[in-house]
């Protein structure tokens, strides 16, 4: 609770977290491309921006790009080519997804992860609790 309730939080600070307002280039999840308007990228902030970050983190292979930190991206290398039951494979995939997303300080929890494997494609959906509230992602497909 603020000492001065009529005074808003300064621009750029998320109330109660001390984190700056998260901004990201908007993303079209169907075409897997950034959104452009008038020759310029469209920026979004808040929960939508965190959702865009999550999409891009899940579609980036961990350790594949030298310009990214080792904590960025999804690592399925432990799943590929392993002889294991479907339950173990799903459990490990959920662990990897949560590990990838919870690196971001704006994401508090990842729940209701649903996934299925079809050939070399992983179909998933999940809910995230962010500092801005809950958001969900349905129809996120990753080629393995």
Image (cartoon, helix red, strand yellow):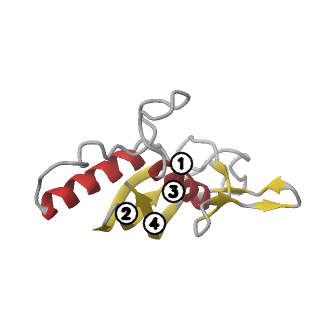
Nearest to N terminus: mark 3 or mark 2:
3
Q: Which mark is residue 121?
A: 2
Q: Secondary structure at mark 3?
A: helix
Residue situated in front as seen by the camera: 136 or 119: 119
Q: Tell me the distance, in whole angstroms, between the alpha carbons under discs 4 and 2.
A: 10 Å
Nearest to N terminus: mark 1 or mark 3:
1
Q: Secondary structure at mark 4?
A: strand
Q: Secondary structure at mark 1?
A: loop
Q: Is residue 87 left or right of residue 60?
A: left
Q: Is residue 36 left or right of residue 129?
A: right
Image quadrant of residue 110?
bottom left
Pointer 3 with pointer 4, Cβ within 8 A: yes
The local crowd at label 3, few if under 14, some if 14 to 19, many if 20 or more residues have their Cα within 10 Å, is: some
Q: Tell me the distance, in whole angstroms, between the alpha carbons under discs 3 and 2.
A: 15 Å
Q: Which mark is residue 140?
A: 4
The image position of residue 89, as x and y in percent, is 19, 57
The image position of residue 53, as x and y in percent, is 55, 51
The local crowd at label 2, few if under 14, some if 14 to 19, many if 20 or more residues have their Cα within 10 Å, is: few
- Residue for point 10% across, 60% down: 85
Nearest to N terminus: mark 2 or mark 1:
1
**Quarter of the figure that contains the C terminus:** bottom left
- Location of residue 117 with respect to 9 vertically, above or below: below
Q: Tell me the distance, in whole angstroms, between the alpha carbons under discs 2 and 1.
A: 39 Å
Residue situated in front as seen by the camera: 57 or 64: 64
Instruction: Select label 4 or label 1 by which is in front.
Output: 4
> Farthest top residue?
66
- Residue for point 48% across, 46% down: 60
The image position of residue 111, as x and y in percent, is 33, 63
Residue holding disc 1:
16
Q: Tell me the distance, in whole angstroms, between the alpha carbons under discs 1 and 3.
A: 25 Å
Residue holding disc 3:
55
Q: Is residue 91 left or right of residue 43?
A: left
């Amino acid at each position: 609770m603020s000492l001065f309730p009529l005074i808003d939080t300064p621009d750029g600070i998320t109330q109660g977290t001390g984190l700056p307002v998260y901004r990201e280039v908007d993303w079209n999840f169907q075409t897997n491309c950034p959104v452009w308007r008038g020759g310029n990228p469209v920026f979004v902030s808040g929960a939508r921006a965190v959702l865009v970050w999550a999409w891009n983190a899940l579609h980036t292979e961990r350790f594949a790009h030298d310009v990214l930190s080792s904590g960025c991206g999804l690592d399925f290398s432990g799943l590929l080519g392993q002889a294991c039951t479907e339950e173990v494979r799903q459990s490990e995939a959920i662990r990897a997804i949560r590990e990838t997303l919870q690196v971001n300080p704006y994401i508090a929890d990842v729940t209701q992860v649903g996934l299925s494997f079809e050939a070399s494609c992983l179909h998933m959906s999940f809910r995230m609790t962010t500092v801005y509230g809950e958001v969900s992602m349905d129809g996120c497909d990753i080629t393995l």
